[in-house]
């Protein structure tokens, strides 16, 4: 019998050598980084169990393994690529888009993804804790144009159900807020995070709830995810997926179309395909906008329209994600 999700999370692999041994690999197979204390290594066992043993190029392994390419210094890559400190009026609250705010209730994630654009984000200065909730609610009261609250991270589902329930119940008192969205990797990485209490909470709330899952490769979606996706759907949660276009992991038409079909099979619709945010330490994952456009054209030919994610990039200061024009004569690459 599986242990509870907190235990599975606590017993994540945090030592690279333990993971390599488990996967029947050695340090000779991969250029492992020696010092990654700034952005630790963490990967829970249910996710590891979807990796192929003996394969140093496994697309799930490459998302989480710290390698020496992280040391590359590339012009245009910085610690703060989205300049989120300029849209951070209250601790734990980012107001980038007019009708939506994003809350970073927790600085913890289910897993540490090496391409993460918030890998240098000062979560410790931006964790409101339960004491900071009132400042968030005050801000929302003063900004009645905000109709949607996005719980992001860190990962909002790293918060336990009791605390999450208290937060949602308080938020429900604000009439201007109608929509609640979770951006999370937890149900993928540790499917047991989809607890009965969470489902009841999501089904009971007056909010229209959506959950944007974050997966990048079809191999993340094994059969263990079918029941939790079904349960979320039955709790009236709209399920979407966003991916990051990652060199060496999903930058092919077949990888992206396989992912879209698998998502659909499990009741999830593709939402966004992001160009990599240019964060220091992740330049080896970068795929150019030109290549992305060519991939998207191939995807459009292969898939029905409802399975084609929108190719977007984030531009600091823009009031929305910026869609990439797939058919303009001259592609903007910079
Ligand atoms: S789950 Fe999201 S926020 Fe957390 S490390 Fe991965 S990409 Fe970053």
Image (cartoon, rainbow, N blue to C red):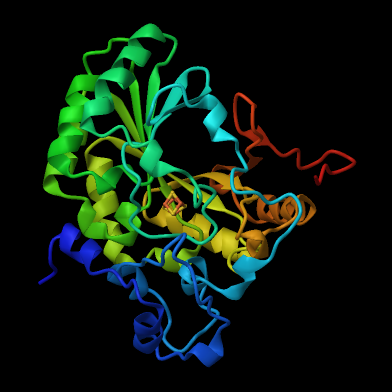
State which quadrant residue 53 falls in. Answer: bottom left
Can you say whether 241 is above or below 95 in the image? below
Q: Nearer the viewer, residue 130 or 214?
A: 130
Can you say whether 18 is above or below 38 in the image? below
Relative to 26, 331 lies left or right: right
Quadrant of the drawing holding the N terminus: bottom left
Quadrant of the drawing holding the C terminus: top right
Report how many numbered discs are placed on residues in the image. 0
Can you say whether 168 is above or below 177 in the image? below
Q: Residue at x 26, y 44 (%)?
A: 232
Q: Nearer the viewer, residue 266 or 40?
A: 40
Relative to 97, 150 lies left or right: left
Q: Nearer the viewer, residue 293 or 53?
A: 53
Q: Residue at x 33, y 60 (%)?
A: 189
Res. 58 in view: yes
In the rendered image, residue 318, in percent from the top left (x then y), is placed at 64, 27
In the rendered image, residue 193, in percent from the top left (x then y), is placed at 22, 53
Relative to 188, 218 lies left or right: right
Q: Nearer the viewer, residue 82 or 164?
A: 82
Residue found farthest to the right:
329
State which quadrant residue 255 falls in. Answer: bottom right
Res. 152 in view: no
Residue found farthest to the left:
1
State which quadrant residue 311 falls in. Answer: top right
Q: Residue at x 16, y 49 (%)?
A: 195
In the rendered image, residue 203, in percent from the top left (x then y), is placed at 19, 33
Can you say whether 71 is above or below 161 in the image? below
């Amino acid at each position: 019998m599986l242990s509870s999700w907190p235990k599975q999370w606590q017993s994540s692999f945090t030592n690279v050598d333990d993971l390599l041994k488990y996967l029947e690999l050695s340090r000779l197979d991969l250029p492992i980084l020696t010092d990654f204390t700034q952005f630790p290594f963490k990967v829970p066992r249910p996710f590891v169990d979807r990796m192929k043993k003996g394969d140093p190029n496994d697309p799930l392994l490459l998302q989480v393994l710290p390698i020496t390419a992280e040391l590359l210094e590339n012009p245009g890559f910085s610690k703060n690529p989205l300049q989120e400190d300029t849209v951070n009026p209250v601790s734990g609250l980012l107001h980038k888009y007019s009708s939506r705010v994003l809350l970073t209730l927790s600085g913890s994630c289910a897993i540490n993804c090496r391409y993460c654009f918030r890998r240098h984000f000062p979560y410790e200065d931006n964790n409101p804790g339960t004491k900071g909730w009132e400042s968030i609610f005050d801000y929302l009261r003063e900004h009645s144009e905000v109709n949607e609250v996005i719980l992001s991270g860190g990962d909002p589902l790293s918060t336990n159900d009791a605390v999450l329930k208290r937060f949602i119940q308080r938020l429900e008192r604000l009439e201007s807020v109608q929509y609640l969205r979770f951006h999370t990797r937890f149900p993928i990485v540790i499917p047991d995070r989809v607890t009965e209490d969470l489902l009841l909470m999501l089904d009971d709330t007056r909010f229209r709830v959506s959950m944007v899952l974050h997966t990048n490769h079809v191999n993340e979606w094994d059969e263990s995810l079918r029941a939790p996706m079904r349960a979320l759907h039955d709790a009236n949660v709209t399920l979407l997926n966003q991916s990051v276009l990652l060199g060496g992991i999903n930058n092919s038409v077949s990888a992206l179309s396989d992912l879209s079909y698998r998502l659909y099979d499990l009741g999830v619709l593709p939402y966004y395909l992001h160009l990599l945010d240019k964060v220091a330490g992740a330049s080896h994952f970068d795929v150019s906008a030109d290549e992305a456009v060519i991939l998207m054209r191939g995807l459009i030919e292969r898939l029905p329209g409802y399975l084609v994610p929108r190719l977007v990039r984030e531009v600091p200061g823009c009031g929305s994600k910026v869609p990439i024009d797939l058919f303009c004569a001259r592609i903007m690459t910079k």
